[in-house]
Amino acid sequence: EIMNDPQMASDGFTYEAEAIRRWLDGGSNRSPMTNLALPNRVLIPNRALRSSIQEYLQASVAKAVSSLNLNL
């Protein structure tokens, strides 16, 4: 699945915002990836990844539209 709102946790891994918030709100203080204790619960938007995802989606739409135009 493509992330909608990528957030970086204090373990250095990026997670979908809704998923990591649910994980943290459920009481876990450990990394879902490493199972090590998280130093804190701060989430930082991963803007670079979000930008890459948006570019990918725009290119995919452009390719689909181009394909439709060729088939007309």
Image (cartoon, rainbow, N blue to C red):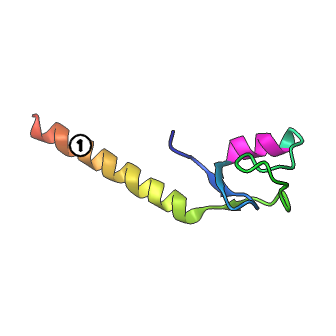
| Residue 56 position (above or below residue 28) | below
Q: Is residue 44 magenta?
A: no
Quarter-of-image position of residue 65 = top left
Circle 1 residues within 10 Å: few <14, some 14–19, many ≥20: few
Query: Residue at the location (18% across, 37% down)?
Result: 68
How many numbered callouts? 1
Q: Nearest the camera: 19 or 70?
A: 19
Which residue sits at x=85%, y=54%? 37
Residue in front for this viewpoint, 64 or 32: 32
Who's the residue at 50% across and 43% down the image? Answer: 2
Q: Hey, which residue is sitting farthest top in the picture?
A: 72
Judge from the rendering whether residue 64 lies leftward or rightward of residue 1; answer left or right.
left
Locate residue 26, reporting x and y percent.
86, 38
Residue 63 lies, in percent from the top left, at 25, 47
The residue identified by callout 1 is 65
Quarter where residue 44 is shown:
bottom right
Identify the image quadrant of the C terminus. top left
Residue 1: x %, y % from top left? 51, 38
Q: Residue furthest bottom?
A: 48
| Part of the protein shown in magenta | 17-24
Q: Amino acid at mark 1?
A: Val
Secondary structure mostly seen in magenta is helix
Closer-to-camera residue (69/25): 25
Magenta region includes residue 20: yes
37 to 69, vertically: above or below: below
